[in-house]
Image: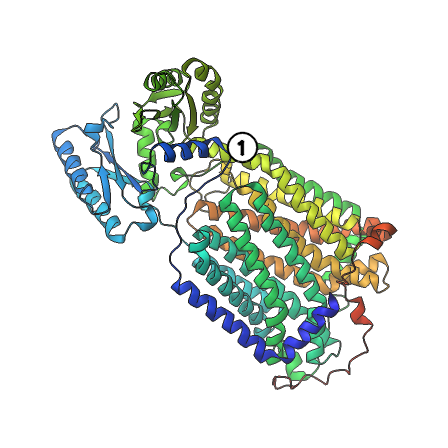
Amino acid sequence: MATFLYRVGRLAFRRRWYVALVWAAVLAAVGLGALKAPGAVDEGFSMPGIESQKAFDLMEQRFPGATADGATARVVFIAPGGEKVTAAGNKQAIEKAVAGLGDGTQVASAVDPFQAKTISKDGSTAFATVTYKVGSKDLTDAGRTHLERAVDQARDAGLTVETGGSALGDDAGPGGTAEVIGVAIAAVVLLITFGSLAAAGLPLLTAVIGVGVSMATILALSSALGLSTTTGTLAMMLGLAVGIDYALFVVSRYREERAKGRVPQEAAALAVGTAGSAVVFAGLTVVIALAGLAVVGIPMLTKMGLAAAGAVVVAVLIALTLVPAFLGFWPNAVLTRRARRSGRIEGSGENNAGTRWARFVLRRPLPVLLLGVVGLGALALPAADLQLGMPGDEAKPTSTTERRAYDALAEGFGPGFNGPLTIVVDGKDAADPKTAADTVAKDIGSTEGVVSVSPARFNDAGDTAVFSVVPSTAPTDEKTKNLVTSIRDERPGIESRTGASYEVTGSTALNVDIADKVQSALIPYLIVVVGLAIVLLLVVFRSVLVPLKAALGFLLSVLASLGAVVVVFQQGHGAGILGVEQTGPIMSLMPIFLVGIVFGLAMDYEVFLVSRMREAYVHGEPPAQAITSGFRHSARVVVAAALIMIAVFAGFIGESDSMIKMIGFGLASAVLFDAFVVRMAIVPAVLALLGHKAWWLPRWLDRILPRVDVEGEALSRRPETDPAPAAAPDPEPART
C-alpha cells in the first residue's frame, strides 16, 4: 500500500498539470450535468415493513389519487379577545378569506370551517383546510403569494390568522452561513497550525473542490436517484470536514519530510505513501460506517449514507492526487515564512506540546484512564432517559407562523388535535363492510385516551374506510404512544367480531413505528459496522487489542454525545443558547446518525494518531517511546483536525431546521469527546498500561492477514535521496 501510494504521489507531483486539468474537467462535467439535470422528484418518506407504511400503501391502492402528495395548508382563524369567530363580522371575514383561498389556480379545495364544523368549543378559534393539486415542491411562488394575500386580508379585518401545513414548507438546502462559519474557523485553525497562508489555504481549496464535485454529482443524479436536499446537506457536512482533514495530514507530513532534508518531489511522494495510507484506511472506515446505514432499512437514510460515503471517497482521491499536484506547483509556499526567508527548514521540536502531553500521560496512565472513562460515563448517563420521536411544528421557533398555528390549535381544540391517528379499515372480507367499519370506529372511540372519532369515509367500492382519531394528549407525549399500542392490541378481538382488519397510521403512529424500527436496527447495525471496522483495523495495526480498544472508546464517546443531546434538546439545559425554543423527544434517526457518522470519524483519529505510534514501534522504538513519538509528530495535527471538524459541524447548529441543528450539535460534541478525551487521553493511557502486549497478534492470524504496510516500512528501506538544498526564498515550482 505505502509503495503504491508513494508512486501515486510522485506521479501526481511530476504530472501536476495533467492532474489539475483532470480534476478541473471532472468538476466542469458534473457541474454541467447538475445545471442540466431536472429537479429532484419528492418521493416522500417511506419505511417498508412498518404498520404505518402498510396503511399508506393500502390507502393508495383503495383510494386511487386521493392520497397523492398534494400540499396542504391549515389556516387558523382566532377571534379578537373576548369575541367569537361566529360573530357576524368575524364570520363574514373568514368566509371571504376561505373563498379567496379557493380561487387559486393550484388549489384543489378550501373547506369552510362553518360548513365542516371545525370550530373550537369556546368559539374562539376555527380553521380551514386548503388542499392543493400539486406537491409542496411543485407549488409556485404565485401559489404561496396567493395564500399569503388571503391571510393578510383576514388579518386586516381584525382576526389573528396563522398558517401551518406542507404548503409553507421551505426545504433549505445545503449552502449558507453554516458552511461559511465552519470554513472561516477552519482557516484560522490551519493558519495557527501551519503559520503559512498557503499551507492553510491548500487544504481549504482542495476540500472546497471536493465538495463541489460531490454536490454537483448529487444534484446531477438527484432526479434519477430521488436524492433530497437533506442528502446533500449531510454529504456537504462530511465532505468538507474530512476533505480539510485529509489534506491537512498530507501537507503536514510533506512539511515534516522537507524538514528531514528531502527534495520537494520525494517529500510529496513520501507524504502520500505514509500519511496517504492512513487517509485511505481512515476513509474506508468512514465509508463502511456510512454505507452500513443501509442495514437499517430506511430508503432515505440509505441514500443519505451512500451520498455522504461518495463525498468521502472524493475527499480521499483528492488528498492522494490533487494535494501533491498543488505541492508541485508551490513546493516552498506551504513552508513557514521563516523557512522561506532564512532558507532553513525546521522540523518538529523534540519537546513540543504533544511530547509533553504524552509524557504526562505516561507518568500517570491509570488516573488519566479512570478520569476519562468516569467523565464520559457521567456525560452518557442522561442517554438512559432518551425518548425518540420526530420533531414537528412544535419544535419551530415561536417567531414562525407554523409554530403559532400549532399552539393555537392545541389551545382551541386540545393538545392531541395536532397529531390525529388515521385508521384504515379493510372490510373486503367482511359480510357488511360499512357495519364493520362503524363497529371498529365505535370500539376505538371508547378506548381510554381518545377524545373524538371522525365519520368514516369510504372508497368507491365501499370495502375500505378511513377515519381520524384525536387523542387527548400531544403527539410527542408518552401517553399518545401508549394509546397507539392499545388500539393495535385491541385489533385481534375486533377483527374476530367484525371480519374486518384495520391499520393505524398518521404522523404520530408513523413516529412511533420509526422509533421502534430504529431501536431494533441499532444492534445489528453496530455489529456489522464495528465488526467490519475491527477487521480493517486488524489489518492496519496488526494487533488484536488496539482495534478492540478503538471500538470501546468509540462507544464511550458516542454515548456521551448522545447524553449531551438529551440534556440540551430533551431536558432543555442550555437550549436557549443554541436557539432551541421547544424541547421534546430526540429525532428518531439521531442514534443511527451518531453511531454511523461518529464511528467513521473516530476511526479517523485512531488511524492518524496510532499509525504514527505503530510506525515508530515497527522501526524499533520501545512502546513508551513509540507513544511519545506518535504524539510528537501527530498531536498538533490531530488537534487541528478535530477543531476543524468541530467548527464545521458546530456551524450547522445555526440552521433553522431542527434536525440539522441537532445533528450538528451531536456530531460536534462527539468529535470533541472522541478526539480530546478518548484518542488524546484514554488511548495513550491504555497503550502505556499494555506495553508490548498492545501490539500482540497471534502467529496464525499474522499469517492470514494481508500486509498493507501502512507505516511505510518498505519506504524506509529505499535508498536515501540526496538531501534537499536550502529552501529557496523564491517559491518557484520545482522543475522535473
The residue under the point 49% across, 37% down is 48
Can residue 54 be seen in the rendering of this structure?
yes
Q: Quadrant of the N terminus?
A: bottom right
Relative to the observer, which residue lies in front, 74 or 429? 429
Q: Secondary structure at mark 1?
A: helix
Q: Position of residue 65 (x, y in %)?
A: 32, 38
Q: Position of residue 411 (x, y in %)?
A: 32, 29
Query: Which of the 4 image quarters holds residue 32?
Result: bottom left
- Is 149 on the left-hand or right-hand side of 548? left
644, above or below 475, in the image: below
- Under mark 1, the amino acid is Asp
Q: Position of residue 683 (x, y in %)?
A: 74, 51
Query: Which of the 4 image quarters holds residue 637?
Result: bottom right
Query: Which of the 4 image quarters holds residue 7?
Result: bottom right
Can residue 628 be seen in the rendering of this structure?
no
Q: Which residue is label 1 attached to? A: 516
Q: Quadrant of the C terminus?
A: bottom right
- Is 232 on the left-hand or right-hand side of 701? left
The residue under the point 32% across, 19% down is 434
Relative to the observer, which residue lies in front, 72 or 192? 72
Relative to the observer, which residue lies in front, 459 or 656? 459
